[in-house]
């Protein structure tokens, strides 16, 4: 029996995790956390009967508590509530599926309490990988990737020796603007950017996929998860999302993990590893597929380049890059800035930051706030 804490239970990964729970009798939900969507959390409480839930927004949490007095559940709020859900005594695996850097502290506390982590929340690793990965080793917990590319790489590395990896081939669909020229990007709308060709995901990651910032974050994520040099990770465009990623070894062999695009596979695998459980759904039909295409990333989509620059400058710069992106994406979704401004805002924040090497958790969180303050203050200059 796996006892789950699901952080981000109302989101794309969270709800698909609950679908996996529905299909597996040996899983029980012990805690749930979300930002503000109390209607859905109320339904989830009535269906899964968790011991504790957190709604980050205090007023919403109080309203939910009033609604569920007939259930034996504690309703908490804020960061303390999120941490309480992540460290619930009866949980043995935490599904880290909140969006953004807000996941850092709950993930760290969960590891310190000896919980295994099924990991989707890439922003946390990008900004605090140098803290989280040593903790994983120190507390000897299992971290299994949920991000589809990293789950693929994880499967390709099963039974292999780390020293024999030549490079990681991280695949990307290329998003909705795969073939667009720089001049064509200026006028794209929020709706255009939200139209991902292969995956249905939360809004923030869908925008990140359209800018290729998602792939830039994923290169950093892979660097931390698999302890491979940044230069040994290559992004390959695979528009159909049939190959979820590949690993090339010293002898030239390439191992790929393939399948239809369905996040329930990596979610379920992360939960049952090293076993595989049955999962319904479509199977790849090679006779219909006929060919698999590859291409180079489109340089007009600057997400990989900016992430690479942040990683090269090191230390707290990845926090600045990530925080500036989180901030700019929210502004773009709110129609306050243009699509290509996202790159300009990230660059502006990076250009105005002096790197702190090996930042502590407090320094990371302070850098995040300073980045938001800078962008808010200078928003008219940047525009
Ligand atoms: P969604 O936007 O769909 O969901 C985000 C979840 O986080 C919601 O449950 C939301 O609650 C919750 N949340 C937001 N802010 C807070 C907060 N302050 N406290 C507690 N909970 C909060 O995102 P996704 O599911 O798409 O993505 C989640 C993470 O997984 C991201 O890091 C993303 O990069 C990663 N990921 C997602 C993939 C996908 O297919 N969706 C694929 C690979 C990685 P509420 O609904 O109440 O706002
Ligand atoms: Mg991914």
Image (cartoon, grey):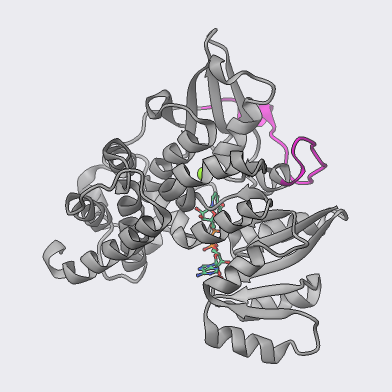
Residue 243: x %, y % from top left: 57, 31
The stretch drawn in magenta includes residue 280: yes
Split into quadrants, the picture shows ligand 1 in the one at bottom right
Relative placement, left or right, of 271 versus 316 is right
From the image, which quarter does the C terminus lie in? bottom left
Q: Nearer the viewer, residue 383 or 162?
A: 162
**Most common SS among magenta residues:** loop
Please say if 179 is above or below 349.
above
Residue 7: x %, y % from top left: 62, 63
Q: Is residue 250 visible?
A: yes
Q: Nearer the viewer, residue 372 or 241?
A: 372
Q: Nearer the viewer, residue 312 or 236?
A: 312
Q: Farthest residue in the top direction?
A: 251
Task: Using the rendered view, name the quadrant where residue 92 is placed.
Answer: bottom right
Residue 236: x %, y % from top left: 44, 29
Residue 50: x %, y % from top left: 77, 71
Task: Using the rendered view, name the quadrant where residue 164 is placed.
Answer: top right
Please say if 74 is above or below 256.
below
Please say if 62 is above or below 191.
below
The stretch drawn in magenta includes residue 77: no
Q: Farthest residue in the right direction?
A: 25
The stretch of residues the image draws in magenta is: 271-292
Q: Nearer the viewer, residue 230 or 13?
A: 230
Residue shown at the point (42%, 55%) measured from the top left: 361
Q: Is residue 209 visible?
A: no
Task: Using the rendered view, name the quadrant where residue 96 is placed.
Answer: bottom right
Relative placement, left or right, of 246 versus 101 is right
Residue shown at the point (29%, 38%) measured from the top left: 305
Q: Farthest residue in the bottom direction?
A: 66
């Amino acid at each position: 029996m796996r006892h789950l804490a699901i952080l981000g239970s109302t989101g794309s990964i969270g709800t698909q995790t609950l679908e996996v729970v529905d299909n597996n009798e040996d899983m029980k939900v012990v805690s749930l956390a979300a930002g503000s969507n109390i209607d859905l959390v109320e339904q989830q409480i009535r269906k899964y009967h968790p011991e504790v839930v957190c709604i980050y927004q205090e007023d919403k949490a109080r309203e939910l508590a009033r609604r569920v007095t007939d259930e034996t559940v504690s309703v908490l709020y804020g960061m303390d509530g999120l941490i309480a859900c992540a460290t619930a005594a009866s949980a043995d695996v935490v599904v880290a599926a909140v969006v953004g850097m807000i996941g850092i502290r709950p993930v760290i506390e969960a590891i310190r309490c000896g919980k295994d982590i099924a990991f989707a929340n890439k922003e946390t690793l990008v900004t605090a990988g140098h803290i989280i990965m040593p903790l994983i080793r120190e507390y000897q917990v299992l971290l299994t990737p949920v991000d589809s590319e990293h789950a693929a790489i994880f499967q390709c590395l099963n039974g292999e020796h780390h020293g024999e990896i030549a490079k990681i081939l991280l695949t990307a669909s290329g998003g909705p603007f795969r073939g667009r020229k720089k001049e064509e990007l200026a006028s794209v709308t929020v709706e255009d950017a939200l139209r991902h060709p292969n995956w249905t995901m939360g809004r923030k990651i869908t925008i990140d996929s359209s800018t290729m910032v998602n792939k830039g974050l994923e290169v950093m994520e892979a660097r931390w998860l698999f302890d491979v040099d940044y230069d040994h990770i290559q992004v390959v465009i695979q528009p159909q999302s049939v190959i979820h990623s590949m690993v090339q070894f010293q002898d030239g062999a390439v191992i790929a993990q393939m399948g239809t695009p369905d996040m329930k596979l990596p979610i379920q695998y992360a939960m049952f590893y090293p076993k595989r459980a049955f999962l319904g759904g479509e199977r790849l039909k090679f006779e219909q597929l006929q060919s698999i295409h590859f291409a180079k990333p489109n340089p007009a989509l600057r997400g990989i380049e900016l992430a690479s620059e942040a990683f090269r400058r090191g230390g707290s710069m990845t926090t600045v890059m990530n925080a500036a992106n989180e901030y700019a994406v929210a502004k773009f979704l709110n129609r306050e800035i243009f699509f290509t401004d996202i790159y300009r805002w990230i660059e502006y924040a990076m250009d105005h930051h002096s790197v702190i090497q090996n930042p502590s958790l407090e320094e990371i969180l302070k850098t995040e706030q300073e980045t938001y303050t800078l962008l808010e203050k200078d928003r008219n200059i940047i525009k």
